[in-house]
Image (tube, rainbow, N blue to C red):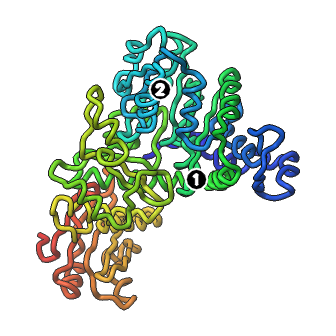
Amino acid sequence: MIVILSSFSAMDTFCIHRDADGISDEEIKLWLNGVIPPIYLSDGEKPSINPTRQALEETLTCLDKAQQPSLTFASGLAAATSVCLSFLKKDDHAVIVDDAYSGITNLFKACLSRWSIHSSFINLSQTPSIITKHLHSNTRLVWLESPSNPSMRLVDIQTIASLVHAHDSSIIVVVDNTFASPLNQSPLALGADICLSSMTKFINGHTDVIGGCLSTNRKDLYDILKTSQSLLHMNLSPFDCYLVRRGLNTLPIRMRQHMKNALQIAQFLEGHPAVERVFYPALPSHPQHDIYKKQGGASGMCSYVLHEAADTKRFLRELKLCTVAVSLGGCETLIESPSIMTHRSTLYEAETNEKMSDQLIRMSVGLENVYDIINDLNRALNLSMNLDSKQDAYSDRELIDKARYAMNRLDSTNAAALRTASGEIYSGIRFQSTIDADIGALSAMINDGHQDLATIVVLRRTVNGIEMISPSGNCRKLIGDLNSNAEVLMGTIEKPYRMAINDLP
């Protein structure tokens, strides 16, 4: 089960109104009596003041649970640059998670290093207390990502922030919350000093805006960042602010579907022979699953390592529905290989970092039909290892889900679902203990004018859960008359396999 923070339901309202009481009188006046804020293309009395930008920043302040107004920037990296230029100077030191977003890694290594600003890249996901060994007298910044990009590692934000502030309260803890979004993780509530998000990703959610934001509870940090925003003119344009504000209206419903799809896809990937390991925080197999359960962090992002025999480039080439691209957080499913795309000049060339697998794939799960996504992945994964690309594992999972839905909806002890060769799906349940579920599904198919049965699954509820069983004798005879090559799903819910009807014992 995905853990959704208790505040998620309140966020549904805040994403639209920012206040449970709706639109204020001041907003009604500012919005010219409209339902949504209009686009003010000009600034106010100060370059940083714009009503459209202000409407967005007020909503972000609410979502990040910040005590100071949020600030928006022209990109996520612009927001990060503003933090660094505001709080770091010559001979200062920063600690950064070692598998950070490549833009952050390059900012510290290729740019700030030229100004004698030093940095250490450390894996903080396994032992949070290790942070104290890397805090020096000149350390001014600790930069965290949870989940990290691209390996989906989680760090214990609350523990690390407490350790850092106990060591030196002047050290600023920054958390990049882009992968989780404000709906699934609240860094400021966990002790972070600054929460950063790339609004390009889930917050906007439509792959048509580049933007970033910063939130903080501390007035001293806010005043400095506000000055930098105005001084450096990294502001987000009014039109982009309008688009992001529009995107926020659907953030909760989008995130729910992203998470639902991602969990189902992660479970599918765990059982595929072309995949060696899957990293999704909501999976019990995730190394930091315990951190996830108390902190959150799951979204539509997951990563997985292909089998060593799989051809990564061919896998990417064979994808049709899923798009190979480096962005994330939009409505469409995007996939990339960090070793040959986003992180080729950082993680895969750094001698001091823990070696990332060249077979690692980063995936931003979109809002398409989950079975269409799984079908595309299954075919491409099979082809990457020269397996049978016609084996539709996704259709097996869909059939099982249809049967389970019918069973749960009508509280039946037996249910069945079948697929015809033309792709139609029919389900049935045991009716008044006289008609078996599988006969009911077959009858529905025949009554609809189809006789091209291809696959069938029959489920039974027991005290130990739901199990897959063979079709009844009457059903097997009917199946044989309709199609002697029809297949039955057997095995377990987690690992089903197909058997020809004639091979059943």
Q: Which circle marks residue 89 in the picture?
A: none
Q: Residue at x 55, y 31 (%)?
A: 187
> Are the residues at dot 1 and dot 2 in contact (C-beta closer than 8 Å)?
no
Above or below for 45 versus 310: above
Precedes in sequence: disc 1 or disc 2: 2
Which residue is outermost to the front? 114
Residue 150 image point, x, y percent: 37, 41
Query: What is the C-alpha distance between the residues marked 1 and 2?
Result: 27 Å
Residue 371 vs 111, above or below: the answer is: below
Residue 213 x/y as whole percent: 61, 39
Question: Is 317 in front, or is 371?
Answer: 317
Secondary element type, mark 1: loop
Where does residue 257 sit, x and y in percent of width and height?
A: 50, 56
Residue linked to disc 2: 112
Q: Return the mark for residue 209.
A: 1
Q: Does residue 186 sit above or below 279 in this rendering?
A: above
Q: Amino acid at mark 2?
A: Leu
Q: Residues within 10 Å of mark 2 (few under 14, many from 20)?
A: some
- Residue 489 x %, y %: 23, 67
**Residue 159 in view:** no
Q: Is residue 16 left or right of residue 464?
A: right
Q: Quadrant of residue 243?
A: bottom right
